[in-house]
Amino acid sequence: MTKRVLLTGATGLIGRGVWAELRNHHEVVLTSRTSSDLPINQFVPFDFGRTELIQDFLDKARPSIIVHTAAMTSIEEVFNNPRDAKRLNVDAVSEIALWCEKNGSRLIHFSSDFVFDGERTDYNEADLTNPLSSYGRTKLESEKVVQLNLRNHLIIRPILVYGYFENLTRMNFPLLIASKLGSGERMSITEDQIRMPTHISDITEVIRKALFSNDRGILHLSGPEALSVYEFALKVAESFQLDANLLIPVKTKVDNVSENRPLKSGFDLERAKRIFDYHPKSIEEGLRLFPI
Ligand SMILES: NC(=O)c1ccc[n+]([C@@H]2O[C@H](COP(=O)([O-])OP(=O)(O)OC[C@H]3O[C@@H](n4cnc5c(N)ncnc54)[C@H](OP(=O)(O)O)[C@@H]3O)[C@@H](O)[C@H]2O)c1
């Protein structure tokens, strides 16, 4: 088997970042359901919700390594479509892990910081999980099916990833702020949700190093700074020279009915530093990489 990488979710934020990082160095097969702009000789459309077809799809693609970023990523969509969410976020991952174990391939799978309950900003990889949302529960289940079915795996949990690529299917935080403030709209932003935002390039550098390494298990990746979402928005406004007065700080409404986001989310990055010499960019550095 040649060392071929299969990148799922190739049109998403993390997928586009991984593709940009690997495209000049590795043979990469790209997949998502639809794509208008990825090279047609490298792109194979596939719906991972069709779990009964996954073994056959992978038999044809025959990757040595799978970087699996495809998922239902919206909290609201997962809550409103629990069956589809389980198929894509859990059952498909199980099928991929089973195929990898049978064929001696490595899986780099993306989970989420939302497996935690938002009490702290220094969670390490061994800390107890306790997801608050259906989305977080599917991501935790996805970790379990990988751990159960496949030895050669790396599970990455990132936090609030941001970055710029052309043709992104959904906006990430700085782009959303730029779009609203740029057109003079006021925006309410939570001042009590704490995050450690991650620039996409810090994740993709680790992926490149992790492709052929023997490192296994769970890996926490985030930026170096914990700050409120409101403070992050202020930094975006300053960096992009937008009117910060349009940002209105508000408190999060926490209830038992809707899907709650963790109030705090942050990581202890010691494992990433030790294994991958991980030195993530400050938010100012990350924002300077936007072509705005
Ligand atoms: N971005 C973050 O801040 C963040 C934070 C924590 C964890 N994560 C995790 O990181 C991973 C990647 O996130 P992202 O932000 O890059 O996601 P994204 O921008 O929402 O992209 C999702 C990708 O999955 C593909 N996809 C969706 N449904 C599919 C299906 N049924 N079959 C095949 N492909 C499908 C989408 O393409 P099509 O719609 O064209 O199929 C798209 O390429 C996810 O597992 C997410 O849970 C992300």
Image (cartoon, rainbow, N blue to C red):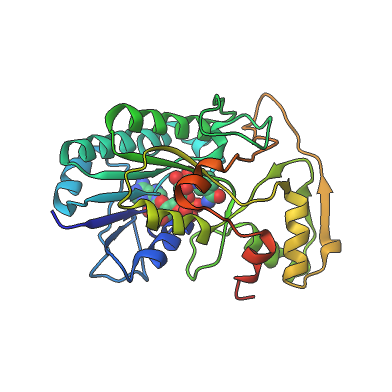
- Above-or-below relation of 212 to 127: below
Residue 181: x and y in percent read 75, 66
* Of 23 and 182, the residue lying toward us: 23
Residue at x-position 64% and y-position 39%: 265
Task: Give the farthest residue toward the bottom.
Answer: 291
Residue at x-position 56% and y-position 25%: 130
User: Residue 114, located in which quarter of the rendered image?
Assistant: top right
Left or right: where 252 falls relative to 5: right
Residue 106: x and y in percent read 27, 44
Residue 228: x and y in percent read 75, 47
Does the image show residue 148? yes
Residue at x-position 82% and y-position 45%: 250
- Above-or-below relation of 203 to 256: below
Residue at x-position 33% and y-position 37%: 93
Does the image show residue 53? no
User: Residue 176, located in which quarter of the rendered image?
Assistant: bottom right
* Of 171 and 64, the residue lying toward us: 64
- Above-or-below relation of 244 to 230: below
Task: Give the farthest residue toward the right.
Answer: 245
Left or right: where 273 falls relative to 284: left
